[in-house]
Image (cartoon, helix red, strand yellow):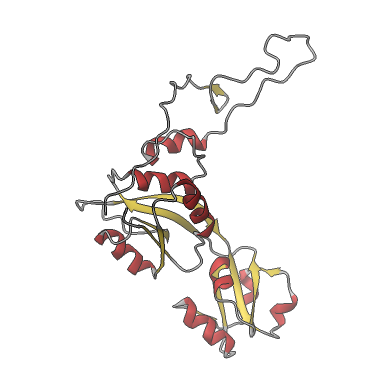
Amino acid sequence: MSSPFTVAFVLGATPGKWARVWNERLPETTLDLVAAEQDAALDMLRAGTADVALLRLPVDRAENSDRPLAAIPLYTERAVVVVPKGHAIEALDSLALSGLEAENVIRGDWRDAVELVAANVGVAVLPQAVARALTRKDVVARMLDDGPEWRVAVVWRDGSVDPLVEEFIGIVRGRTARSSRGTAAANDAAEDAPPSRATQKSGSGNKKGSGARSSGRTHNGKSAAKRPARAKSFRPQPRKG
């Protein structure tokens, strides 16, 4: 029986959608999801008790260590302000940071901050996903139009040769089961470029290219070189327990 593949994730990160894809593609390998604070998730990653982690940037990559960390940003979180139920801000759909000048903005641990907001001590600025995870009946959240932003990234030990790490990175990057694998860094540039679209039939009567797909990708208006034929996709072998 193969050993589990462990993913540590911070508050507000939602790995469930990727877990469903993982279970469809690799049913023989259990995916363990472990909720952890940022520092604890980093410790798990460096100790090898987590294979990958979903963290908020920046992270200390320890570039000079034997096993530095690598990261790929996945998405950006917007900020909300959490206020007590019945607060004047509750009547708004959104507001600017300047609207909080008269408020006592609570800083520090997000869980503790929400508890203090519920006690009517002040208001707190949090990532929207964190506010959703900590939702309760006695507080409400409203969007901040010009608030801070946080980037969530998938992080792993750089130089990993574990094909399951590559498989997980591919899943969170949106690669299909038939996509070519390889190192995540090598695939980033190719996947960030939009695929070229089929040549549209023009009114000039040129039918030769009509309906044909471009043989390469385009970037900054220039045709990219043809990509080599892909190797047959492989399925990662279960790790020995």
- Look at the picture and state if 138 lies above or below 203: below
The C terminus is located in which quarter? bottom left
Report the side of 142 relative to 217 (left or right).
right
Closer to us: 239 or 14: 239
Closer to us: 173 or 119: 173
Answer with the quarter of the image where residue 114 lies: bottom right
Percent from the top left, x then y, of residue 211?
Answer: 69, 18
Closer to us: 231 or 85: 231
Percent from the top left, x then y, of residue 124?
Answer: 55, 77
Report the side of 123 relative to 13 (left or right).
right
Q: How many labels, in total?
A: 0
Which residue extends farthest left?
Answer: 66
Report the side of 226 relative to 198 (left or right).
left
Which residue extends farthest front?
Answer: 1
Q: Say which residue appears at 47% left-offset and 69% top-offset.
A: 11
- Look at the picture and state if 57 lies above or below 163: below
Percent from the top left, x then y, of residue 105?
Answer: 54, 80
Q: Say which residue appears at 51% left-offset and 37% top-offset.
A: 192
The N terminus is located in which quarter? bottom left
Q: Say which residue appears at 34% left-offset and 42% top-offset.
A: 237
Q: Say which residue appears at 52% left-offset and 54% top-offset.
A: 20
Report the side of 36 relative to 193 (left or right).
left
Closer to us: 175 or 79: 175
Percent from the top left, x then y, of residue 7?
Answer: 39, 59
